[in-house]
Amino acid sequence: MDLKFIEREDPDIARAIAMEAERQRHTRAKELFEQKFITKEALEIQAGTVARQEARVQEMQARVDKAVIWAPFDGVVGLREISPGAYVKAGDDIVRLENLDSIKVDFRIPEVYLAKVGRDQAVAIEVDAFPGETFQGHVYAVQPVVEQETRTLRVTKVTDTKVIYNGGRRVSDLLGNPLRIRKVRISGNQNIPAEFALGKHWSTRWITDRPNGREETDFELRVTARETITVPAGSFDCFRVDFQGLAYGPKGAVAVEGRYWMAPDKVLQMVAQEVLRKASNKGKVLKGLRRELVSYQQG
C-alpha cells in the first residue's frame, strides 16, 4: 500500500498545542500549591502564562472570524476577481453577487420625453440576451437632472473648417473630431480619420484645456472590424476603431483605452463609444463610460 502525506507548518496549530500544554501545567501547579509544594507567587506566574496564551488564541479566532465573508443577501455569484492564496484588504472586489429575483435597470431617454415618465409607471423591457421575451416592471425613481453628455446636438452653423452645435456649446471639425465641449477646449486632433479601411493604423496627439488644468494626450488607433451594432437610435453598419494611449495632466499620467463605432455614411458623430481611464502605474480603473447615440435626424 502506497501512502502519501503532505506536511506543512501551521503557527495556529502550534499555538493551540502550546495553550493546552500551559493549561495542563496550570492544573498541575494548583495541585502542587494545595499540597504546599510551591508558593502562591509561582502559581500566579503560571496563571498569567495561561491568560496570555488564551489571549493569543482569542486573537487568532478573531482573525479566523474576519476571514469568513457573509453575503448580505441570497443571490448568484459571478466570476471571482482574485486567485486562491491571494491577500485581500478592505475594499477589494472578491466576487460579484447579484440578486436575480429583482433587477434594477438604468436607462436613459431623450430630454423631450422626460415629462412623460413618472414614478411607478409600468414599463416593458426587452433585452438582446433573451430575444422574444418581455420583462415587466415599473419606474421606481427618475433622475431629476438631465445628463449633459446625452443632450441633443443640433447643428446651428457650418463653416469651411468647423461644425458648430447648439449655438457654440460644442464645436467639431468637418470630420467630427471635437474641438470644444462647453468650457473644455481641444486642439486639432485626428481621432476620426478622413477615410476608414480595415487595418488602417494611425496616431494622433492633442492638448485639452480644462478649467482645472491642461492635459496632453497621445493616442494609437486602428480600424479593427466592421460590425453592426444596435443603440437606442437604431442599428448601424459601423467601422470599429480601437484606441489606447496616455493622457498627461496635473495629477500625472493616466492610461486611456477603448473603442468607438462610426457609420460615416449616415452620422457625423460616433454611434457609440467606450472609454476606460486607468492609473498608469497601478492599473486601477479610475473611470469607465459608454456613450450611445439616442436619436438623429438628417437635415
Image (spheres, grey):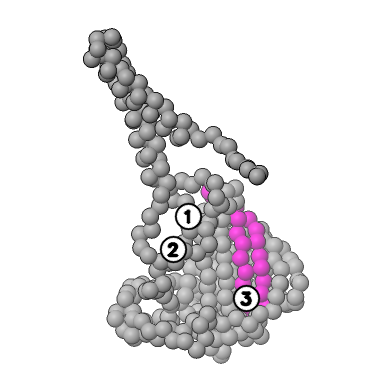
Q: Secondary structure at mark 1?
A: loop
Residue 257 at least partly seen: yes
| Amino acid at the residue labelled 3 | Trp
Query: At which x and y percent is residue 294?
Result: 50, 81
Horizontal side, residue 99 vs residue 212: left or right = left
**Drawn side of residue 94 relative to residue 57, left or right:** right
First in sequence, mark 2 or 3: give its number: 2
* Amino acid type, mark 1: Asp
Residue 268 as seen in the image, left or right of residue 125: right
Task: Name the residue that disc number 1 marks.
Answer: 93
| Residue shown at 41% from the left, 49% from the top | 68
Residues at badges 1 and 2 in contact (C-beta under 8 Å)? no
Spot occupied by residue 240 in the image (x, y as percentages of width and height): 66, 74
> Magenta region's main secondary structure?
strand
Q: For marks 2 and 3, give the CA distance.
A: 31 Å
- Camera-near label (2 vs 3) is 2
Image height of 228 relative to 59, above or below: below
Residue 253 is one of the magenta-drawn residues: yes
- Please say whether residue 184 is visible from this viewpoint: no
CA–CA distance in space, label 3 to label 1: 31 Å
The image position of residue 136, as x and y in percent, is: 38, 84
Query: Dot 3 surroundings within 10 Å: few (below 14), some, or many (20 or more)?
Result: many
Closer to the camera: disc 3 or disc 1? 1
Residue 12 within the segment the image draws in magenta: no
- Residue 110 placement (x, y as % from top left): 43, 81
- Quickly name the residue at label 2: 97
Tell me if mark 2 has few (under 14), some (14-19) or many (20+) residues whose alpha carbon lies within 10 angstroms of its own.
some
The dot on residue 261 is 3
SS type, badge 2: strand
Q: Callout 2, which amino acid?
A: Leu
The residue range painted magenta reads 239-263
State the quadrant of the C terminus: bottom right
